[in-house]
Amino acid sequence: MIFEGISGQGNGWLSGHATFYGGNENPATLGGACGYDNTFEAGFGVHTAAVSGALFRSGEACGACYQVMCDYNMDPKWCLRQRLVTVTATNFCPQNKNGGWCDPPRQHFDMSMPAFLRIARQGNEGIVPVLYRRVTCKRRGGVHFTLRGQGNFNMVMFSNVGGSGDVKAAWIKGSKMRTWVAMHRNWGANWQSSTDLRGRTLSFRLTLVDGKTLEFFNVVPSSWRFGQTFSSKNQFF
């Protein structure tokens, strides 16, 4: 089978390996290095994965979607034949984890248990070979904007992003401002700006890794406070 990848990442399936997190599936523990406090509230559910550095791309991969299947031809004992699962990258699998399988340049998925058991048999505590490809993220509702920071330091977490799912560039604009102000990735899915925007209605412009751009006008009211999350009406597809 040959499938078309997105964003020029190549045709067909790529080879990698997968393990699973373990039994603790509290959604508050699965956001890790991307900064998602709760994968349910972020719109991702429990089908998530920590990905190796080759896939994580210093946090740029946060929110990206991958379709994963266990490579039955390589491991018929533990792989379920022709089973697919779509996972969202929500965490980073550090080097020397799982016996070094997360070390560069390996492509590795440390998956949540519910996602892993969609493609592999229960009872396997080890590593299975997988085939994976990038796919479009299908989200319910609009993009989420969570406001963090303090004073004139604004940090915004973008989540529940459709399309390619991974944000390449971001801009912010307050009411009565004529131009967009570029934001910079602080860590994971958190982007920062040092412009004092307190008391202003906020708009955002996001560009994804696949090149698609959307503008979200007045998505945050002027009465906003740090710690609040707001959802847009429009979404990437």
Image: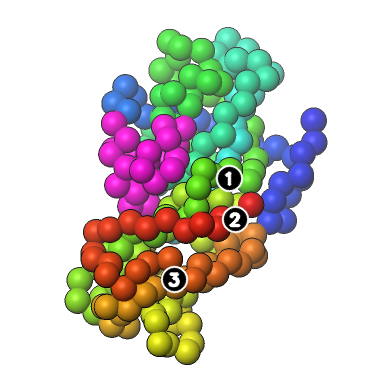
- At 39% from the left and 46% from the top, the residue drawn is 42
Which disc, if any, is residue 218? 3
| Mark positioned earlier in the residue sequence (3 or 1) | 1
Indicate whether residue 33 is drawn in magenta.
Answer: yes
- At 28% from the left and 67% from the top, the residue drawn is 224
Which disc, if any, is residue 236? 2
| Mark positioned earlier in the residue sequence (3 or 2) | 3
Q: Position of residue 180 (x, y in %)?
A: 48, 82
Hey, what amino acid is under mark 2?
Answer: Phe
Hey, what amino acid is under mark 1?
Answer: Cys
Residue 127 seen in render: no
Few, some or many residues within 10 Å of mark 1 (<14, 14–19, 20+): many
Mark 3 in CB contact with mark 1 (< 8 angstroms): no
Few, some or many residues within 10 Å of mark 2 (<14, 14–19, 20+): many
SS of the residue under disc 3 = strand
Please name the residue that numbered disc 1 is placed on. 137
Mark 2 in CB contact with mark 1 (< 8 angstroms): yes
Indicate whether residue 188 is drawn in magenta.
Answer: no
Q: Indicate whether 119 appears above or below 192.
A: above
Front: mark 3 or 1? 3
SS of the residue under disc 1 = loop
Mark 3 in CB contact with mark 2 (< 8 angstroms): no
